[in-house]
Image (cartoon, rainbow, N blue to C red):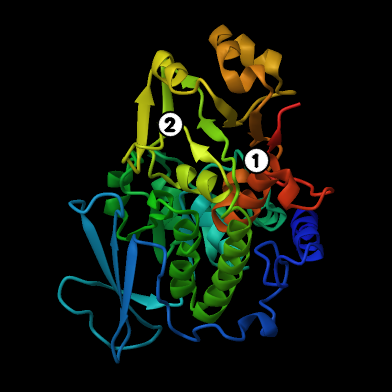
Amino acid sequence: MGSMRKIVLILVLAAGLLPLALSCRKTGPARPDALQGAKVGLITPQYAEGFKVSYTEDGCLVDIQDPRREESESFHYFLVPRGSGAKAPEGYERLEVPVERVVCMTSLQLSNFICLDELDHVVGVTSTRHLFNPEMKQRLADGRTQKIGIEGNFDNEVILGINPDVILISPFKRGGYEALRGVDILLIPHLGYQETTPLGQAEWIKFTGLLTGEEEKANATFEAIERRYNDLKALTADVAERPVVLSGELHGGNWYVGGGRSFLAQIFRDAGGEYFLPDDENSGGLNLDFETVYSQTAHAHYWRIVNSYAGTFSYDALKAEDARYADLYAFQHKGVVYCNMREKPFYESMPVEPDVVLADLIHIFHPELLPNDYQPVFYELLK
């Protein structure tokens, strides 16, 4: 278990808020006591809307579709035990599980394998720009895992050489996946990034559990995450003041923000805040100009920023990027909530640690609800 994760759990436990549970930053197999009470052998998504599971006598039917768009393409797979002779129903692609060799295209996908301690399955990854996990670094160093290139420029020779059973993709991104369709390897969408709730995104570890044959471990791991998250969320249920929160930065003249029904908006609300677009019904992203953002953030107490800044990020550095930033209320009142991806494993860990992210935000929005010596893991106020 990583030191940062230990700090989070120890502090929250000391406050009497949460029971001891399985950590996603473990270094060994799942603890037997953590498995008690799990839905043994059955995967039943409760929060995730992007995949559905049903069982037959011969295997498991998995249906995948973008949870944000009902009219989007759907994908269908029939998972059967390795060595089984069962045939797939019409409209389903057959896959023997547990899979032995997987390629991950995103940090979110990789986070699932890290959380379940199943990196032995991962034989290929794309970018390693923000890779922190020591085991995966060692696997890359000794050749057990290969870099397959970047989205839009994959090395098909490397992919064929590592011979994966499955390539996990993000089909609604412009990733150049058409080039992979000719290598005769099963492409399976992993749509955790499309989920609109923190627990929905984290629940995709159950999908990974199906692929790796670790359903029990996946269920137990998620139940622990869910319990911690909901216990923390309950702390903010009756807060009297809910600070308004802005997110994002200008890029190319546009300010990209999540909609009012997005993943970010939800976790801000669960942390006792209020998103600056409370009436917006979009679950995806929006492009706004500075004037629109400024007009709607007259009293936004906090401004959340995640970037990859080389050096020490500061208010002066932020103002140097665009002088208009200094006009924002959150800038003037030193309310910038910051995470530097060069220093913290944000996208490698955040998808399966929404409870830790939530604790960080509660500590900022309502510090009286957590111990005085709480140490943030991802987010903290910019100094």
Q: Residue furthest right?
A: 373
Q: Nearer the viewer, mark 1 or mark 2?
A: 1
Q: Which mark is residue 63?
A: none
In this orientation, does residue 275 appear? yes
Is 4 positioned to the left or the right of 239 in the image? right
Please determine whether, in this image, residue 326 is positioned above or below residue 301. Answer: above
Residue 168 or 147: which is nearer the viewer?
168
The percent coordinates of residue 265 (x first, y second) are 46, 42
Choose the circle earlier in sequence order: 1 or 2: 2
Q: Nearer the viewer, residue 220 or 92?
A: 220
| Residue found at the far front of this picture | 240
In the displayed structure, does residue 212 sit left or right of residue 9?
A: left
Residue 99 visible in the current orientation: no
Q: Residue 356: which quarter of the image?
A: bottom right
Instruction: Tell me the crowding category of disc 2: few under 14, some 14 to 19, or many 20 or more residues within 10 angstroms, Cα based.
Output: many
Tag 2 secondary structure: strand
Amino acid carrying label 1: it is Phe
Q: Residue at x 48, y 19 (%)?
A: 250
Dot 1, how many residues are within 10 Å of its Cα: few (below 14), some (14-19), or many (20+)?
many
Which residue, given by chain and number where applicable, does mark 2 sit on? Answer: 257
Q: Is residue 217 above or below residue 199?
A: below
Q: Tell me the residue that label 1 is attached to.
A: 365
Residue at (60, 52) in percent of width and height: 236
Whether 295 is drawn above or below 166: the answer is above
- Percent from the top left, x then y, of residue 22? 67, 71
Residue drawn at the location 68% of the way across and 76% of the way down: 29
Question: Observer-nearest residue: 166 or 28?
Answer: 28
